[in-house]
Amino acid sequence: MSRRSKSTRRAAALWLALALSVSAVPAVAQTTTLSPDQARMAAAKLLSEGHARASIELTRVLVQRDPQDATSLILLAQGLRTTGDFKAAQDAARQAWKAADRDVEKYGAALAMAQALSSDNHKTRAQLWLRRAAQVAPSEATRARAIRDYQFVRMANPWSVNLSFGLVPSDNVNNAPRDNTIVLGGLVFVDPTAVPLSGVEISSQARLRYNFNITETHRNYAALRWAETRVVLTDDAVPAGVEDGDFLYQQLRAQIGRDFTTGPGKPRHSYSLSYGRIWYGGSHLSDEVRADWSSTFTLPEKHYLTWSADIGYAERQDNDVRSGTTGSLGLSWSRPTADDGRLTLDAEAGRTVTDSKTLTHSRAKLGLTYVLGQKVFGARTSVALSGQFRSYDDAVYGPDPRQDVSASLSTSFLFTELDSYGFAPKVTLDISRNHSNIGRFDTQSMGLNIGFQSVF
């Protein structure tokens, strides 16, 4: 028998093991001698017909003959999982992964490991192995199966972890005004430190969530979130005494909430209560408590309408006068477009009240986001445009109260064809401009965010 023929038969056995759906097997007399390829085929058929223990005995003989027989190890892992021996199934799948030298074998080993881990209630580790399976999948169909299994395990997993990282080169990392002069009482003052500085923002975020008391209509959850932004200054004209660490932003937030609906076709609701702490420049800046509510209505033709409300109180540690209450109401409407994209319109109104005359204000915001249905340069593309108006209550810097009008434009490209283990590079260009009747609050910035996003 040729080497190519043996490889073909081994592949056939492996595909049979992955599919676990075959026709009946003719009875084989006890005196019949099977070649390794025939034995693998027989083991796969026994397993598909529900004779897991017989399949295990046969594959153990094959593994004793050749401990590097990846196909037999995959069959052994599947058989052990079927009989409930999840630890042994994981050992066999791990050995199969190490022994595999072809993508189809690696795929089968990763899938077998994920199934054994999921059955053993290790959902998060199973998700990691399904990402491996998707990475080495030998075809689009097998990749789609790995992704489908990943989504199923994710839904069944009470734990979820979300990680994000980004690099943002910017020409104004300190959000400095365009004009660093201040006019008070007819006198002009110049702040030499209030100048835009170029640099790179390095952002990271981690969110851990646990769902509990889950039913068909509701689930409760507890979550913990950590966010951090570091700045590396690249400007040649950094003012004396200004360091990278002066712009370090860190936030820790704990949250508990509930997602629920009253039945099929009914609106989906969510409410939560959270407590957070913020540090800036390495110093404790504020403590915050916040309550959120949102409701999403499914309308005909895949239209969605969401309204939201939140209210929070921040206790400032740098200056108690700055402590105060912030609240907002929001409305969002989303609909599909003719090119299989999606258009979303957002509106928000908010109010901040403190004892500080420089912070108390009202605001209104409008936004539009368009996710293109067709790829641009091989990337999923979205464009977002927003505008905001702020009106402050008190005149602090001149005869008139401060008023700001700001606008921002953002374009994102998610390069799905370059994904690795389900994570694809994402590039976002942000341009923003704030115009104020008080010159010191005129700002503009442009940044390029480079990060990664999960595609499934």
Image: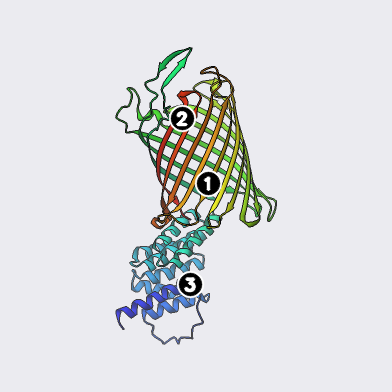
**Mark 1: which amino acid?**
Thr
Please say which color scheme the image uses: rainbow
Mark 3 and mark 1: Cα distance apart in space: 42 Å
Cα distance in 3D space between marks 2 and 3: 53 Å
Circle nearer the N terminus (2, 3): 3
| Category of crowding for the residue at label 1, using alpha-carbon neighbours closer than 10 angstroms: few (below 14), some (14–19), many (at least 20) | some
**Mark 3 residue type:** Ala
- Asked which secondary structure carries label 2, the reply is strand
Q: Are marks 1 and 2 in contact (CB under 8 Å)?
A: no
Percent across and percent down for residue 114 are 46, 61
Type of the residue with mark 2: Trp
Q: Earlier in the sequence, mark 3 or mark 1?
A: 3
Q: Earlier in the sequence, mark 1 or mark 2?
A: 2
Viewer-nearest of discs 2 and 3: 2
Q: Position of residue 206 (x, y in %)?
A: 46, 43
Quadrant of the rendered structure where residue 313 is? top right
Location of mark 3 (residue): 19
Task: Indicate whether 355 appears above or below 341.
Answer: above
Q: Assign the N terminus to one quadrant of the image.
A: bottom left
Looking at the rendered structure, the secondary structure element under dot 3 is helix
Residue located at (45% from left, 72% from top)? 17
Q: Which quadrant of the figure has residue 204?
A: top left
Residue 369 on image: x %, y %? 53, 46
Q: Is residue 256 above or below residue 44?
A: above
Mark 2, residue position? 279
Q: Nearer the viewer, mark 3 or mark 1?
A: 1
Find disc 1 in the rendering and name its residue: 369
Left/right placement of residue 61 relative to residue 156 reads: left
76 up-or-down from 402: above or below = below
What x and y, as percent, mark residue 393? 59, 23
In this orientation, which residue lies closer to the viewer: 159 or 259?
A: 259
Do the numbered discs 2 and 3 sit on residues whose CB atoms are within 8 Å? no
